[in-house]
Image: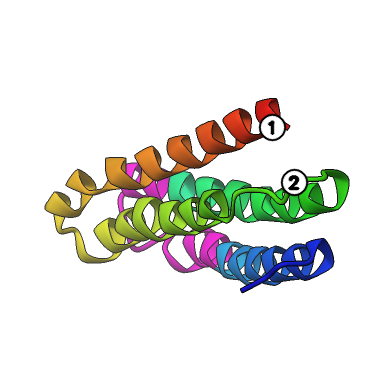
Amino acid sequence: MIDRPWECLMFWIRIGAALAAIGVAAGAFGAHGLKDRVEPEMLEVWKTAAFYHLLHAVALFAFGAWSLHTAHPPPRQAGWLFVTGIAIFSGSLYALVLTDIRVLGAITPLGGLSFIAAWAWIAISAAQG
């Protein structure tokens, strides 16, 4: 369990950095490795996955930094919802592009709901203290 703000900051920075590195690699793979292998429509799907992946990896950095500027620790559940959102939203889109199994797109909204829940949880927590 992480109780001190500095530990919380470093934990989410490590998670965010790892996910950002993977997101950059995924974006580069889409731009260079998939460019001539998939239809332009599917390349756009890949770009969307990489964009949301990187956006929420950076959000984890901000989430960790928040712990240094508040008397109350941030809700860890929101951080895990970001991680879950990246895995489900971006992961399902990456898999859809790589496998062309269209049903994978059906689980993508669950990742989007995870992102929404994380942002809502943070907004509510910030308003409370």
Indicate yes or no whether the magenta region holds residue 28.
Answer: yes
Which residue is painted at 55% across and 59% down in the image?
A: 27
Render colour scheme: rainbow
The furthest residue to the top = 127
Is residue 86 magenta-colored? Answer: no
Magenta stretch?
A: 26-46
Disc number for residue 126? 1
Is disc 2 placed on a helix, strand or loop? Answer: loop
Q: Quadrant of the C terminus?
A: top right
Q: In this view, does 15 lie to the left or right of 112?
A: right
Along the line of sight, the residue nearer the viewer: 122 or 21: 122
Tag 1: residue type? Ala
> Residue 92 falls in which quadrant of the image?
bottom left
**Tag 1 secondary structure:** helix
Q: Crowdedness of circle 1 by 10 Å Cα count: few (<14), some, many (20+)?
A: some
Q: Tell us which disc is closer to us: 1 or 2.
A: 2
Q: Residue 68 at x, y = what percent?
A: 85, 52
Question: Is 52 placed left or right of 103 in the picture?
Answer: right
Q: Position of residue 63 (x, y in %)?
A: 70, 50
Query: Label 2 crowding class (10 Å Cα cut-off): few <14, some 14-19, many 20+?
Result: some
